[in-house]
Amino acid sequence: MPPAPYRNLLLRSNRYLGAALVETDLVGIPELETATERLLEAAAAGQPRRCNVLGILAYDLKVLKEEDVLLHLVEEHAAGLVDLRDVELADDLKQTLASAIKRNRARKDVEPIAPGRSRQRERAAAGSGNRRSARHAQTGGVRRWARAARD
């Protein structure tokens, strides 16, 4: 179980997210109630990576599609998206990422990163990593680029 201040934040933020999803008709109330029950179970079991309503609705219950959420964000809130198909990565980074992905797929004890949480943000929160990656994680670099694309 997370410490009391974090538990309250966890429950409150997921309650607001769930209410917003129901308000926009992306999920129904019964699905949200089921997801909330699973959230409480995950919190009680001490599984912080599974403590988010969005992940439970999308991946466990399969009642919410990522495409629907993205489409809603683009149409209703005029959010821009970043197309990563044209991003060039260094060859050594590609090889490192490919081998890390293969290792993680082979391991059964590794849980995927929860939606909205990245290893880069975890490193920035811990104070490691380079200055650029920490700044990117703290400022939400994708949001900054999306706003620039929208303007």
Image: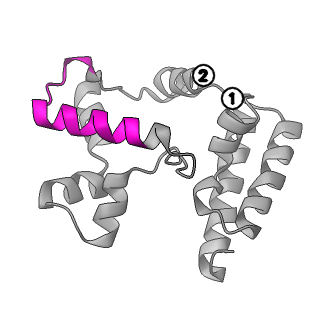
Q: Residue at x 57, y 46 (%)?
A: 108
Range drawn in magenta: 85-103
Q: Do residues under tags 2 and 1 come within 8 Å of each other at their CB atoms?
A: yes
Q: Residue at x 14, y 54 (%)?
A: 132
Q: Is residue 90 visible?
A: no
Residue 141 drawn at (x, y percent) = 26, 44
Q: Is residue 60 above or below residue 78?
A: below
Query: In the image as oriented, which residue stretches furthest toward the bottom?
Result: 4
The rendered magenta stretch, by its main secondary structure, is classed as: helix
What is the CA distance from the residue labelled 2 to the residue labelled 1? 7 Å
Return the residue at label 1: 64
Please indicate whether residue 99 sits to the left or right of residue 37 in the image.
left
Label 2 crowd (10 A; few <14 / some 14-19 / many >=20):
few
Query: From the image, which quarter does the C terminus lie in?
Result: top left
Please indicate whether residue 42 sits to the left or right of residue 100 in the image.
right
- Which three-letter amino acid code belongs to the residue tagged 1? Leu
Return the residue at label 2: 68
Residue 17 drawn at (x, y percent) = 65, 48
